[in-house]
Image (cartoon, rainbow, N blue to C red):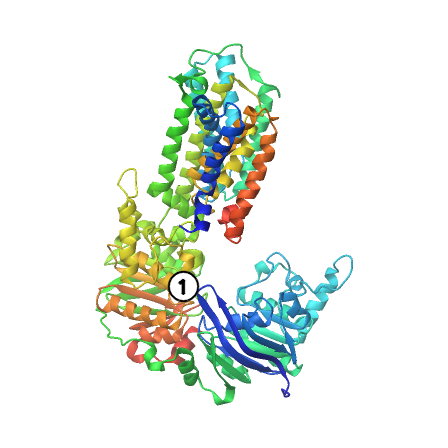
């Protein structure tokens, strides 16, 4: 295929492969099975959040509240276990359902009340952050020990493979296939791409958007549980560490495989690139915050190149920012 | 009257874009002070030619002389400074600024801060000079499409240009405002301002202009005094075929049985008012009327996209449930191809060619429960569909941006024509923005669909010639109501137009 087309579709994937090769040489300890598994584990929560955001964006919306929503849900779970002696499974179920409820609220406000999703989710996100701070008193909430089974999702392993890697693969495979190979996924792309035309083809666009928010809620629910399970503690800011990286991954992923259209596989590839960068930087002993600098530069270059090749014609949602 | 100087002399100008030769060695002279019309079909090169005169585009070959001096514009501001102004086909207004602010945009009186009072005053003065009455103090987003276009035209004459180029200026104007525009143009001529008037509406051009240039396929065919031209001759030059060859032969096959009855339908917005309409089996029913007369809204109501509170729709003898969803209507064979392919019909960027067709078939192509899409089935279905209407494309996975307007319309039609159940097709302005050759192909297709393939069609169009050319019967819309109806043997242009206005 033509050079340009190849760059547009597989540029990011190629970059990922090149980075792997590069760091194998210059980062001590990078090239090992152990580290590969580490990278996949580190990717899990970021990928879940990114996929949750991507689904919403494909349908034509945006979400600024996924991270703080997952945070407040996680805090609630921890409070239930520590202060109210709930068992692990029911508490985690509440965490999951809380994320779903938040998604339902966001969906209602955006679809029914027709509020622009950027503003609506900014508001919801701020409220969540506020509640997180209220509940924790602004500090980290932790316990000396948690009941058995608590750390399974976040830190458990089956053989040499962490549970998080399984979560990543299962969620990833389901999400990619859902969006790319089912009628629901196709209708979601149609709704986000041209809502008027989607209606003219008989698609129930409101219903489709509600379902997308539900998918987002499910993915955030899993991320939320995994996060607290891994940390064994919760601070109001713990989600924030994922907010910008997830948004970055989503945008970066737009330029992979689909030439400027948001897609799940692209988001996963981008999350991979970002995780590889931060992992490699640690291996090389670089100061932690260099990864933000590099991530930002990568985003600029990547989207900039694609923008130039496509002469500024990026998918509406992406271009609107 | 125009003196002998030419304001523009265009010599051997050629301009091409990837895959398209838009302007083919055109020689043209625009006399100073005249009203010069440029006519031709969509794609003839009228707008492109004028974009070369205003610096939006640069010619590949040839020379342009302005007031005797050779010019080479590299930027629109070059032309603006020389007093060349153009008002475009698509709106270029700022929706949240007022009419006055839009008129003075870019040429505001100097000063550290903008003097809004002065701006309003200057705009009002201009309006008065040309005898136009529009509210200039509210955001233009609240004005009608007609007034928005007038505001843009006023912007064009603010600061008195030497030459004003108008591209399809009456496309959104009401009758009254169009009259106002013609007065304005005659006023401009009195002031010595040259006007180039691009339009595909021959009547207007022949009435208003001093000289007319006819373009076809990027070439200049002829320039003549308007008084030496008549519509028939112009059509011949534009379409390169006789008036009688523009439409295929019509064999009326309509049966007596009614496949669709709309009875006293009124929608919630009052865009459709107590409309009653019948569609017979195998009939090609034309629905004519001005833009905004309620035809699209009726189509949307039939298709389930627009709620209606009063009246009913009877399909095949049975009343349709008001709340029947669009997808259910599609499954029953009621289909609608919308006007405005770009906004309501096709999916650019996200879907390639086959996905644009297949999106209309996923209800039965996908597996029942989970809804998995079999890749090859979609592609096969789409290939058959687009081939059936002779679409010209390279690859079933290509981007629809690469297709011409006519072929994009074919893709849109193919989406529904390939449905397993097709009973009624409502087509809203299906030939809009399409070249003459493809239009003929579509006319043949529509006739074949009703005469040989058992379809019944509601054909909504604002182009009276084509409605009269191919329809079995015409129903006329006026301001949300049906104002008249004529069978083919009684088709009469004046009668139909008078019913619509």
Give the residue at x 24% y 55%. B421
- Can the viewer see residue B429? no
Label 1: chain?
B
Residue that lies at the very extreme toward the front in this rendered image = A25
Crowding around mark 1 (Cα neighbors within 10 Å: few <14, some 14 to 19, many 20+) is some
- Residue B7, compared with residue A248, is above or below; it is below
Residue B488 x, y percent position in the rendering: 29, 77
Give the residue at x 57% y 21%. A235
**Image quadrant in which you'd find residue A34:** top left
- Residue B479, compared with residue A218, is above or below; it is below
B37 left or right, relative to A139: left
Q: Nearer the viewer, residue A143 or B117?
A: A143
**Image quadrant in which you'd find residue B241:** bottom left
- Residue on which the image places disc 1: B404
Residue A300 x, y percent position in the rendering: 57, 42
- Can the viewer see residue A257? yes
Residue B99 x, y percent position in the rendering: 63, 63
Q: In which quarter of the image is the C terminus of chain A?
A: top right
Q: Which of A34 and B106 is in front in this view?
A: A34
Report the label total. Answer: 1
- Residue B159, compared with residue A134, is above or below; it is below
Residue A69 x, y percent position in the rendering: 52, 29
Residue that lies at the very extreme toward the top in this rendered image = A144
């Amino acid at each position: 295929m033509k050079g340009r087309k190849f760059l547009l579709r597989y540029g990011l994937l190629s970059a990922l492969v090149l980075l792997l090769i590069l760091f194998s040489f210059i980062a001590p300890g990078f090239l090992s099975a152990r580290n590969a598994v580490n990278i996949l584990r580190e990717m899990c929560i970021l990928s879940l959040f990114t996929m949750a955001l991507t689904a919403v964006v494909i349908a034509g919306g945006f979400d600024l509240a996924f991270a703080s929503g997952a945070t407040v849900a996680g805090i609630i779970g921890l409070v239930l276990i520590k202060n109210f002696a709930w068992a692990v499974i029911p508490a985690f179920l509440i965490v999951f359902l809380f994320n779903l409820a938040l998604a339902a609220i966001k969906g209602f406000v955006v679809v029914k009340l027709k509020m622009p999703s950027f503003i609506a989710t900014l508001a919801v996100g701020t409220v969540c952050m506020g509640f997180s701070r209220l509940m924790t008193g602004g500090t980290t909430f932790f316990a000396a020990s948690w009941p058995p089974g608590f750390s399974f999702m976040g830190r458990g392993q089956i053989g040499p493979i962490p549970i998080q890697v399984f979560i990543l693969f299962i969620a990833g495979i389901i999400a990619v296939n859902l969006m790319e190979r089912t009628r629901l996924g196709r209708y979601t792309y149609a709704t986000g791409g041209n809502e008027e035309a989607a209606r003219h083809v008989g698609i129930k666009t409101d219903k489709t958007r509600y379902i997308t928010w539900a998918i987002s809620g499910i993915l955030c629910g899993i991320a939320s549980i995994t996060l607290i399970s891994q940390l064994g503690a919760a601070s109001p800011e713990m989600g924030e560490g994922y907010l910008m990286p997830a948004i970055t991954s989503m945008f970066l992923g737009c330029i992979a495989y689909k030439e400027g259209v948001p897609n799940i596989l692209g988001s996963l590839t981008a999350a991979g690139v970002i995780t590889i960068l931060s992992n490699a930087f640690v291996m090389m002993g670089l100061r932690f915050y260099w990864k933000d600098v590099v991530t930002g530069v990568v985003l600029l270059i990547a989207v900039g190149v694609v923008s130039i090749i496509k002469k500024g014609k990026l998918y509406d949602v992406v271009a609107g920012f | 009257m125009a003196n002998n100087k030419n304001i523009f002399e265009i010599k051997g100008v050629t301009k091409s874009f990837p895959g398209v030769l838009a302007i083919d060695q055109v020689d043209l002279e625009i006399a100073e002070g005249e009203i010069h019309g440029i006519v031709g079909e969509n794609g003839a090169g009228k707008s492109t030619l004028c974009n070369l005169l205003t610096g939006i585009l640069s010619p590949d070959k040839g020379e342009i002389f302005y007031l005797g001096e050779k010019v080479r514009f590299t930027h629109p501001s070059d032309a603006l400074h020389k007093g060349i102004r153009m008002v475009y086909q698509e709106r270029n207004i700022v929706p949240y600024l007022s009419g006055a602010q839009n008129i003075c945009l870019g040429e505001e009186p100097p000063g550290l801060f903008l003097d809004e009072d002065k701006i309003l005053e200057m705009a009002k003065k201009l309006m008065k000079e040309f005898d136009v009455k529009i509210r200039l103090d509210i955001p233009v987003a609240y004005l009608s499409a007609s007034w928005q276009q007038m505001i843009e035209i006023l912007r064009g004459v603010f600061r008195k240009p030497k030459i004003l180029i108008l591209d399809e200026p009456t496309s959104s104007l009401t009758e009254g405002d169009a009259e106002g525009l013609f007065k304005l143009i005659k006023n401009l001529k009195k002031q010595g301002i040259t006007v180039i008037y691009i339009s595909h509406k021959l009547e207007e051009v022949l009435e208003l202009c001093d000289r007319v240039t006819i373009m076809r396929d990027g070439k200049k065919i002829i320039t003549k005094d308007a008084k030496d031209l008549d519509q028939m001759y112009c059509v011949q030059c534009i379409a390169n075929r006789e008036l009688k060859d523009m439409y295929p032969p019509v064999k009326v096959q309509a049966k007596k049985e009614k496949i669709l009855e709309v009875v006293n339908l009124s929608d919630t917005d009052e865009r459709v008012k107590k409309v009653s309409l019948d569609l017979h089996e195998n009939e090609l029913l034309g629905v004519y009327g001005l833009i905004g007369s309620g035809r699209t809204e009726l189509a949307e109501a039939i298709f389930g996209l627009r709620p209606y509170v009063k009246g009913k729709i009877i399909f095949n003898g049975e009343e349709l449930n008001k709340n029947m969803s669009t997808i259910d209507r599609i499954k029953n064979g009621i289909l609608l191809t919308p006007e405005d392919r770009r906004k309501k019909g096709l999916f650019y960027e996200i879907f390639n060619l086959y996905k644009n067709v297949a999106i209309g078939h996923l209800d039965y192509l996908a597996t029942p429960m989970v809804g998995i899409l079999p890749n090859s089935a979609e592609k096969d279905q789409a290939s058959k569909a687009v081939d059936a209407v002779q679409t010209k494309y390279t690859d079933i996975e290509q981007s629809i941006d690469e297709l011409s307007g006519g072929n994009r319309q074919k893709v849109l039609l193919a989406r529904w024509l390939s449905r397993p159940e097709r009973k009624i097709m409502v087509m809203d302005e299906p030939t809009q923005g399409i070249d003459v050759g493809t239009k003929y192909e579509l006319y043949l297709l529509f006739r074949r669909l009703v005469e040989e393939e058992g379809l019944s069609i509601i054909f909504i169009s604002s182009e009276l010639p084509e409605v009269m050319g191919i329809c079995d019967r015409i129903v006329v819309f006026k301001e949300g109501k049906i104002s008249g109806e004529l069978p083919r043997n009684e088709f009469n242009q004046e009668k139909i137009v008078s019913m619509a206005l």
